[in-house]
Image (cartoon, helix red, strand yellow):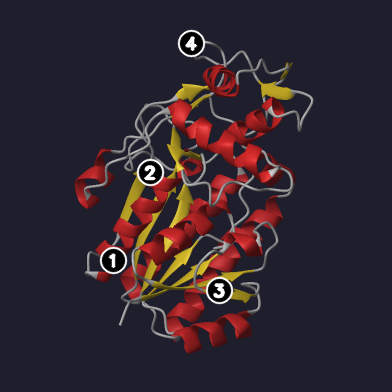
Amino acid sequence: MSDRILVTGGAGYIGSHVVLALSEAGYEVLTYDNLSTGNRWAVLEGEFVLGDLDDGELFRKTVRRFRPDAVMHFAASIEVEESVRNPLKYYRNNTVNLVETARVMAEENVENIIFSSTAAVYGSPDQIPVSETAPLLPINPYGASKMMSERILSDLSLTAGFDYVALRYFNVAGADPLGRLGQVYRNPTHLITRAVKTALGQFDRLELYGTDYPTPDGTCIRDYIHVTDLARAHILALEYLLEGGGVKVLNCGYGHGSSVREVIESVGRVSHSRLPIVTCPRREGDPAELVADCSLIKEVFGWQPVHDDLDFIVKTAFEWEKNRNK
């Protein structure tokens, strides 16, 4: 009998790619999602339950019936700028809902969780690339909500025999190379998604936020990781937990960054177009540079990226967007 994995937020961008990877790896999967930002059609495999994590009774009934061996927790609000404008939404959706998830898990004797964390917990780190031992000094409510959630899991692991892996994502991008899944948000904020949509004429311009950062070309630098490589990291984390590996907190990135201007140039190359750019002031809550030290995840899991190429990341995102709108 295959292991059972319950995935919260499995109808979202990253969650849906991981649900597909779990099924292809032979796991039995149940997705629990309220579809506030996810899409039902994106859950290509396994069972689906429409539900909110603040509906504790429904979530408990689902856990009790499905009896998962582990939970993968993706359900969260993820927009930095929105978190600055509406911090309570982020503390409720991200931190409070993690507490509710963990409470039900403890009551139902589910002891393994893989938590979707973020590089935003580091804030504006003094040292680049940033390692997992760097101070956690988030500069926006999104990062703070995830930092608090990590602390909750850490405390639980000491008191309740609770094991977890927290994966700190850097900038996730791209789409399934076979064209089955990609990023679909009603109001996309991710640079690569907005850039390919602009190249395809869905937006009349691309806003470039900040050209005066202390970086070589004045624009922000980010470590972009292909979503399929990230999904593979989740499978390895799950195998590690189910084999009794214990608590780990790991960065997920490639160890090098690309600037906003470099991303725009890549989209131009892939789409054979010139993007209309409008420069804007910096956005509140954006650090100048975030690049992962990803040596630990390679050491612990033997993880090796397959798609570490900016043009390939952009190409999969572009092809997904182009084919989706035919």
| Residue type pointed to by label 1 | Leu
Q: Is residue 99 above or below residue 269?
A: below
Residue 62 appearing in the image: yes
Q: Earlier in the sequence, mark 2 or mark 3?
A: 3
Q: Quadrant of the C terminus?
A: top right
Residue holding disc 2: 252
Identify the mark at residue 241; answer none if there is no mark.
1
Q: Is residue 70 above or below residue 17?
A: below
Q: CA distance from mark 3 to mark 1?
A: 21 Å
Residue holding disc 3: 100
Total marks shown come to 4
Q: Residue furthest front?
A: 326
Q: CA distance from mark 4 to mark 3?
A: 44 Å
* Apparent side of residue 58 relative to residue 226 in the rendered image (left or right): right
Q: Earlier in the sequence, mark 4 or mark 3?
A: 3
| Residue type pointed to by label 2 | Cys
**Contact check, label 1 and label 4, Cβ < 8 Å:** no
- Number of residues whose C-alpha sits closer than 10 Å to that of mark 1, classed few (under 14), some (14–19) or many (20 or more): many
Q: CA distance from mark 2 to mark 3?
A: 26 Å
Residue holding disc 4: 216
Q: Residue furthest right?
A: 204
Locate residue 39, reporting x and y percent. 66, 60
